[in-house]
Image: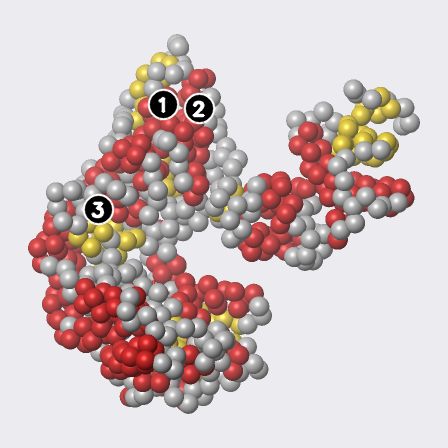
């Protein structure tokens, strides 16, 4: 059975603030009976101060779902809505003395119920933007949706890369088979076949001719473009100086919040394709040729 | 978990997961860790005595399952290895047959192997079950073609105890000239078996489910059956399972087999009566609950109850707090919040499938224990329902799926 902390057990055996609250003026509901857990969070909010004067919950679910709900109500009572929204799912897990990776979704559910309740109070509509897949990596609690999205976004093709990007597979190795299956599926979608052998590019580091080096850099850029274009952006290779590769982010990608993340991913692929450490530096294109080094 | 009610003796009702190794079996095993340490294959007196006792233990197991020859028993490391050996052997022995017939409710030892074989290119036919966990023999009959390498269906389901008509299915397979294997891990030791008169070619059993030790099991392999070993190496088990014998395990399983035979009628009268009492007692006191499986055709020790609008793990934790050990088909893990594949195959509605609890008894349970469980369960369910957004006072909220309506789709 689960290795629950004493705090989890305590909150499960003696849940705080359980039961309906008829006078609630902010109600958040997440989950469903078919998923196996469902939580209704009820808050009494002082309209002038937006302070949560009382909170209660009703939960259908496992031990940690009930404990997470109980913990959440304790954590947010007395806070303003703004303060309460700063509570992350990790905060809930920490409050409980940690949750097993398989059970982290219980804390996520708590956090979502809170967002939903706040939206309800403000007369807004809250949308669940998080999709959860089957748990693949138990060591680092990474699910299939996360792995699939990361493979797709970064054109990954090996378990090693997936580990570098998501941590999945970096522990006990038992999920490598599962990761390979996801790789095979996503790679098939983009017309490639997955092969368990490590990418051959890595075998002879440092022996690339200048021409070959540029060719590989261009390949990585080309591979990254379709994804960026889908988001109405683009990337262009500007120059290569030793171990520094200058690129220009264009369209919606330029300065977007995801820029750093995208560049990080592409840089990682460059490193793997070239077998050496390189740095990817974004530059602003003033005119087609003129380049401004940001640093 | 570590917070059982310390004042009361714990009650163990999870015997389908594993049983307590009988003290007689433990006592018989101990010398084989110390003075009787010889290798039964050795050509000296250290080995000879051990070889002799292994033979006696094999005879005891042979008797329990009514096998005609003691050489039809191949010791393995447990039920899982026996299942894997049987299926993989059949595929190796008939390389041109690429289909397997099994059921949707098998133990993972068969299910996950078949999933893997499917990826390797085999065609897997998974027989469906109805709401009571019963198989459709007409569906089965149509699948029996000369493309099928093996039929592997369990004798009794570990979650509900429901029996499949394996004897009839084995005869049908034999008429179609197809090997028939059954996972009888939950049956051996609980129900009389007579392999000498059976059409079953291969049968898996496991020591720790019949008050024997863990890590020992056997594959019954009918004389004359085509066979390919899973493990190759030394000539142990007549070359059918290489590796130095697990002598203490074999000895312990021998004693467990003898004890199981002695208690066979007790299991089917006394244990069955306790199980029936437990079922009636709980269902009389808890509303919105029902027993799952084929109630008139199941193992004498197994009871699976679905409690609507509560979740299994939460029930187990509260039972455990009172020193009561049972198990749940609910697999409350991230992403796969799916109830057990057995409950899904039977089409148990989600409102109930997440709250299924298996109580599995053994000859060691007493009536006093059963009375305690009957008293403990109703308040636990009531307590959890009080927390549930799907429950309102004395019954489920009207139209639970609608009453609880998250604001997003
Ligand atoms: C029906 C069934 N088959 C196979 C097994 C696996 O047996 P073992 O634990 O000996 O490998 C079990 C035990 O959980 C079982 O219930």
Res. A25 image quadrant:
top left
Q: How is the image coloured?
A: secondary structure
Chain that bears disc 2:
A
Q: Which mark is residue A235?
A: none
Cβ(mark 1) to ligand 1 < 8 Å? no
CB under 8 Å between discs 2 and 3: no
Q: Residue B179 at what x, y percent from top left?
A: 43, 83
1 and 2 marks in contact (CB < 8 Å)? yes
Give the residue pinned by disc 3. B319
- For the residues tagged 3 and 1, is the chain the same? no
Q: Give the labeled residue for mark 2.
A: A87
Q: Which SS class for mark 2?
A: loop
On whether disc 1 and disc 2 are found on a single subunit, the reply is yes
State the SS at label 1. helix
Mark 2 → mark 3, Cα distance in angstroms: 33 Å
Q: Residues within 10 Å of mark 1 (few under 14, many from 20)?
A: some
Q: Position of residue A75 (x, y in %)?
A: 36, 23
The Cα atoms of the two marked residues, 3 and 1, are separated by 28 Å
Which residue: 29% across, 66% down?
Answer: B34
Residue underneath mark 1: A75
Residue B143 % position (x, y):
46, 79
The vertical placement of A128 against B181, above or below, is above
Q: In the drawing, does residue B403 fall left or right of residue B143?
A: left
Q: Quick one: label 3, few (<14), some, or many (20+) residues within 10 Å? A: many
- Point out the tag, 1 or 2, that comes first from the N-terminus: 1
Residue A61 in view, yes or no: no
Residue A50 visible in rendering: yes
Q: Nearer the viewer, residue B193 or A133?
A: B193
Q: Residue at x 16, y 42 (%)?
A: B6
């Amino acid at each position: 059975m689960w290795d629950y902390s004493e705090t989890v057990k305590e909150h499960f055996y003696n849940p705080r603030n359980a039961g309906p609250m008829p006078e609630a003026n902010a109600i958040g509901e997440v989950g469903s009976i078919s998923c196996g857990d469902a939580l209704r969070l009820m808050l009494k909010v002082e309209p002038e101060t937006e302070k949560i004067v009382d909170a209660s919950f009703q939960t259908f679910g496992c031990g940690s779902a009930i404990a997470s709900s109980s913990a959440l109500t304790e954590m947010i009572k007395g806070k303003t809505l703004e303060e309460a929204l700063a509570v992350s799912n990790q905060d809930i897990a920490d409050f409980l003395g940690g949750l097993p990776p398989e059970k982290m979704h219980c804390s996520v559910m708590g956090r979502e119920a809170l967002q939903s309740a706040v939206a309800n109070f403000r007369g807004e509509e809250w949308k669940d933007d998080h999709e959860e897949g089957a748990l693949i990596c138990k060591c680092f609690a990474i699910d299939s949706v996360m792995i699939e999205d990361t493979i797709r976004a970064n054109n990954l093709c090996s378990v090693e890369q997936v580990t570098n990007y998501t941590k999945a597979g970096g522990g006990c190795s038992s999920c490598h088979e599962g990761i390979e299956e996801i790789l095979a599926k996503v790679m098939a979608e983009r017309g490639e076949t997955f092969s368990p052998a490590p990418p051959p590019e890595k075998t002879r580091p440092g022996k690339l001719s200048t021409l070959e080096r540029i060719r590989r850099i261009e390949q990585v850029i080309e591979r990254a473009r379709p994804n960026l274009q889908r988001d109405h952006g683009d990337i262009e290779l500007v120059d290569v100086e030793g171990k520094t590769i200058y690129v220009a982010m264009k369209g919606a990608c330029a300065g977007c919040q995801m820029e750093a993340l995208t560049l990080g991913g592409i840089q990682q692929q460059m490193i793997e394709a070239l077998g050496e450490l390189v740095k990817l530096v974004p530059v602003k294109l003033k005119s087609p040729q003129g380049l401004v080094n940001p640093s | 978990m570590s917070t059982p009610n310390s004042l009361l003796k714990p009650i163990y009702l999870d015997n389908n997961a594993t049983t307590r190794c009988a003290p007689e079996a433990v006592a018989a095993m101990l010398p084989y860790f110390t003075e009787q340490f010889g290798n039964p294959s050795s050509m000296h007196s250290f080995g000879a005595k051990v070889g002799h006792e292994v033979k006696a233990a094999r005879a005891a197991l042979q008797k329990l399952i009514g096998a005609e020859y003691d050489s039809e028993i191949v010791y393995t490391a447990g039920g899982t290895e026996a299942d894997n050996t049987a299926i993989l052997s059949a595929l190796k022995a008939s390389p041109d047959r690429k289909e397997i017939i099994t059921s949707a409710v098998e133990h993972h030892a068969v299910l996950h192997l078949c999933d893997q074989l499917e990826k390797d290119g085999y065609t897997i036919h998974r027989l469906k079950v109805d709401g009571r966990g019963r198989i459709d023999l007409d569906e089965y009959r149509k699948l029996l073609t000369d493309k099928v390498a093996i039929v592997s269906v369990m004798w009794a389901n570990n979650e509900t105890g429901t029996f499949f008509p394996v004897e009839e299915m084995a005869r049908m397979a034999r008429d179609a000239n197809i090997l028939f294997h059954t996972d009888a891990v939950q049956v051996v030791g609980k129900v009389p078996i007579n392999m000498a008169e059976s059409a079953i070619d291969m049968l898996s059993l496991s020591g720790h489910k019949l008050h024997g030790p863990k890590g020992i099991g056997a594959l019954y392999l009918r004389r004359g059956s085509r066979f390919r070993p899973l493990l190759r190496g030394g000539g142990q088990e007549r070359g059918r399972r290489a590796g130095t014998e697990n002598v203490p395990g074999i000895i312990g399983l021998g004693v467990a087999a003898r004890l199981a035979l002695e208690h066979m009628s007790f299991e089917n009268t006394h244990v069955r009566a306790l199980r029936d009492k437990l079922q009636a007692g709980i269902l009389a006191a808890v509303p919105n609950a029902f027993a799952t499986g084929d109630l008139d055709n199941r193992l004498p020790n197994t009871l699976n109850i679905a409690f609507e609008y509560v979740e299994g793990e939460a029930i187990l934790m509260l039972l455990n707090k009172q020193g009561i050990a049972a198990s749940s088909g609910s697999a409350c893990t991230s992403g796969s919040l799916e109830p057990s594949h057995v409950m899904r195959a039977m089409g148990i509605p989600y409102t109930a499938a997440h709250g299924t609890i298996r109580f599995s008894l053994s000859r060691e349970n007493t009536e006093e224990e059963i009375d305690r469980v009957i008293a403990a369960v109703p308040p636990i369910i009531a307590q959890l329902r009080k927390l549930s957004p799907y429950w309102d006072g004395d019954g489920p909220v009207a139209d639970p799926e609608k009453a609880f309506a998250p604001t997003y789709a």
